[in-house]
């Protein structure tokens, strides 16, 4: 039994590490030219996530992952982010087990959450966001393999 399977069996929430770094981009094809063709990341897949009004491109280099996030609507959260701040780092995603229990623990500790319950994200994962005010200005995504 793997360590992750053991953590799931015990039922306690845990943060396993950084799952990916997400970069907001206005043009997915142009960003892929940079990250895939020039920097050498392997494109794992492109996936629309209608619930979030984005299309994501997952890129990997060894054990590291970058997710390019392009809005499908200018009034989506990522579209508004790009209008306000321009392209760049959007969020850091943490790989977790026990996302619901972790959200409850964070809420009980007074951590400001954007999502109090997980929702469907890309790559067959459940996700929830922690507000940047709670993390020194960094949007944090919690993500658990569904």
Image (cartoon, rainbow, N blue to C red):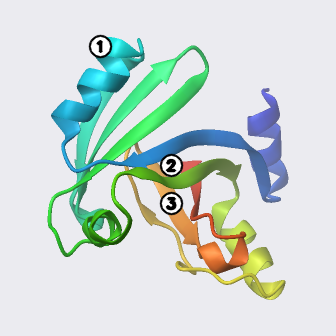
Q: How far apart are marks 1 and 3 (CA)?
A: 29 Å
Where disc 1 sits, the SS reads helix
Where disc 3 sits, the SS reads strand
State the image quarter where residue 80 is shown.
bottom left
- Nearest-to-viewer mark from 1 and 3: 1
Q: Classify residue 61 as left or right of residue 80.
A: right
**Residue at horizontal 78 percent and vertical 27 percent from the top:** 2
**Residue at horizontal 41 percent and vertical 11 percent from the top:** 40
Task: Tell me which numbered mark, 2 or 1, is placed earlier along the sequence.
Answer: 1
Image height of 137 relative to 11, above or below: below
Q: Classify residue 79 as left or right of residue 110.
A: left
Q: Classify residue 28 as left or right of residue 59.
A: left
Q: How far apart are marks 3 and 2 (CA)?
A: 9 Å
Name the mark on residue 68.
Answer: none
| Image location of residue 108, percent across then percent down | 80, 86
| Image location of residue 125, percent across then percent down | 47, 49
Q: Name the residue under label 2.
A: 146
Image height of 128 relative to 88, above or below: below
Q: Mark 3 points at which residue?
A: 127
Task: Tell me which numbered mark, 1 or 3, is placed earlier along the sequence.
Answer: 1
- Nearest-to-viewer mark from 3 and 2: 3
- Nearest-to-viewer mark from 2 and 1: 1
Within 10 Å of disc 2 (Cα), the crowding (few <14, some 14-19, many 20+) is few
Q: Name the residue under label 1.
A: 37
Task: Tell me which numbered mark, 3 or 2, is placed earlier along the sequence.
Answer: 3
Residues 85 and 126: in front is 85
- Quick check: can you spot residue 43? no
């Amino acid at each position: 039994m793997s360590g992750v399977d053991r953590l799931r069996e015990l039922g306690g929430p845990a943060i396993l590490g950084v799952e990916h770094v997400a970069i907001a981009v206005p043009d997915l094809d142009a960003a892929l030219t940079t990250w895939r063709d020039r920097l050498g990341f392997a494109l794992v897949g492109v996936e629309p996530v209608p619930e979030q009004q984005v299309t994501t491109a997952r890129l990997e280099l060894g054990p590291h992952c970058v997710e390019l996030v392009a809005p499908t609507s200018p009034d989506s959260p990522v579209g508004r982010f790009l209008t306000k701040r321009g392209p760049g780092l959007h969020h850091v995603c943490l790989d977790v087990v026990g996302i619901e229990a972790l959200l409850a623990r964070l809420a009980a500790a007074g951590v400001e959450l954007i999502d109090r319950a997980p929702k469907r994200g890309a790559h067959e994962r459940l996700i929830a966001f922690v507000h940047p005010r709670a993390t020194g200005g960094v949007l944090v995504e919690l993500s658990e393999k569904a």
